[in-house]
Amino acid sequence: SRSREFSADAGGAEISGNPLALASALQKISRGNQMNHLRNTNPSTAHMFIISPLFGGMGKLFSTHPPVEQRIAKLQEIAAGRR
């Protein structure tokens, strides 16, 4: 599933033509997720979120999403390759 997230991000960057805009959106969503930590989120629904609501320890172990920092870094690499 993590590799599919990277593929989906690359596809979104290709369709939009602006990978940095997608990276910016992921940053904003991530900040909102951290500010409004979803304490009562059921781990079995984590795969439905754009950014995983699971933090730290066991949350990282069972996360269906790659860390947002890695997703943003990949999008920045895509943008750098287009210059």
Image (spheres, grey):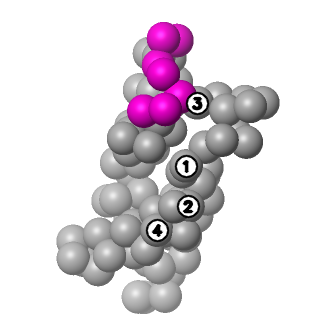
Q: Residue at horizontal 42%, vertical 88%?
A: 83
* For the residues bearing labels 2 and 1, Cβ distance under 8 angstroms: yes
Res. 2 mark? 2
Going from N to C along the chain, the mark reached first, 2 or 1, is 2
Label 4: element kind: helix
Q: How packed is label 2: few (under 14 Cα within 10 Å), some, or many (20 or more)?
A: few
Q: Which residue is mark 3?
A: 54
Q: Determine crowd level at label 3: few under 14, some 14-19, many 20+ residues with C-alpha closer than 10 A.
A: many
The x, y position of residue 40, in whole percent, is: 48, 11
Label whose residue precedes the other's in the sequence (3 or 2): 2
Alpha carbons under labels 4 and 3: distance apart: 18 Å
Disc on the earlier residue, 1 or 3: 3
Q: Residue at x 49, y 32 (%)?
A: 44
> Mark 4: which amino acid?
Arg
- Determine the image quadrant of residue 7: bottom left
Pointer 2 with pointer 4, Cβ within 8 A:
yes
